[in-house]
Image (cartoon, rainbow, N blue to C red):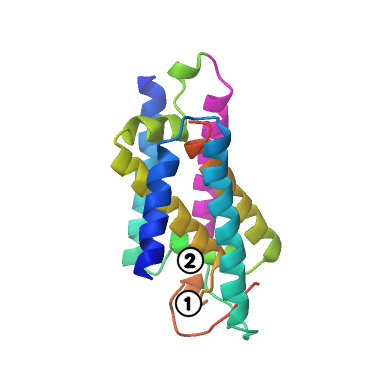
Amino acid sequence: VIARLAVWVVLAVAVATAEVVALTTSRLVTLGGALTSMLRHRVLKVVLVAAWLWLGWHIFVRR
Amino acid sequence: MVAVAVVVVAFGWWVVGQPSDTPASLFGVLAPGVLVVIAGSMAARRRGPVADGPDRSLSGVWIWAVLGAAVVVFQLSNLFAMPREDHPTISSMVNALDEPRVLRTLFFLGWLALGWWLTGPRRFGRAGTAGSTTARGSTS
């Protein structure tokens, strides 16, 4: 369990680091910027909205 | 507006108090989810057709793709591994964190806000940053 939790922590730190780098430099697009660009495409928007609905079901219904 | 906010918060409070895997909890997620999608799409459409802006810089977007793929793969590997209690998933960690009902309600409201952000009206600016004034666009 500890090892798997550690992997989650590493992934969370990686996401946070990438976001900080994106916000403080222009070398990287922010996560919001990347998602917004995806939302320009109808198919990707449907995928993201479906993923959002699944997340709500997974966390609040199947908890 | 205040009345709507009060209703949404009260509804969220009610939803997170429902037992899992019941028709009430399913209704509590599906109903506002569908409402957000419909209302967000209508609001985005009301803005009318607007020209797309120039190409945005997506430098380093591959990093987000790699991180997203890593999260999905690790989540799925945990989801289907046994025993379940030894393989934490995002939802099991969130459930452990948000035991207080107030916190769970805030998670629910955050989930609704994310849905509105995904479906509602937005501006497309530099590198796709919503809120920028360089250009406006709509996918709906």
Q: Residue at x 40, y 36 (%)?
A: B17
Q: What residue is shown with label 2?
A: A33
Kindly identify which residue carries mark 1.
Answer: B126
Say which residue appears at 38% left-offset and 71% top-offset.
Answer: B1
Residue B70 counted in the magenta span: yes
A54 up-or-down from B44: above or below: above
Q: CA distance from mark 2 to mark 1?
A: 8 Å
Packing grade of label 2 (10 A; few <14, some 14-19, many >=20) is: many
- Please give the label number shown on residue A37: none
Magenta stretch in the rendered image:
B60-82
Chain identifier of the residue bearing label 1 in the image: B
What secondary structure predominates along the stretch shown in magenta?
A: helix
**Badge 2 amino acid:** Gly
Of the pair A57 and A15, the residue shown nearer to us: A57
Measuring 44% from the left and 79% from the top, which residue is drawn there? B132
Is B101 rendered above or below residue A41?
above
Q: Can residue A35 be seen from the camera position used here? A: no
Name which residue lies at 54% across and 15% down.
Answer: B82
Q: Position of residue B75 (x, y in %)?
A: 52, 33
Front-most of A19 and A46? A46
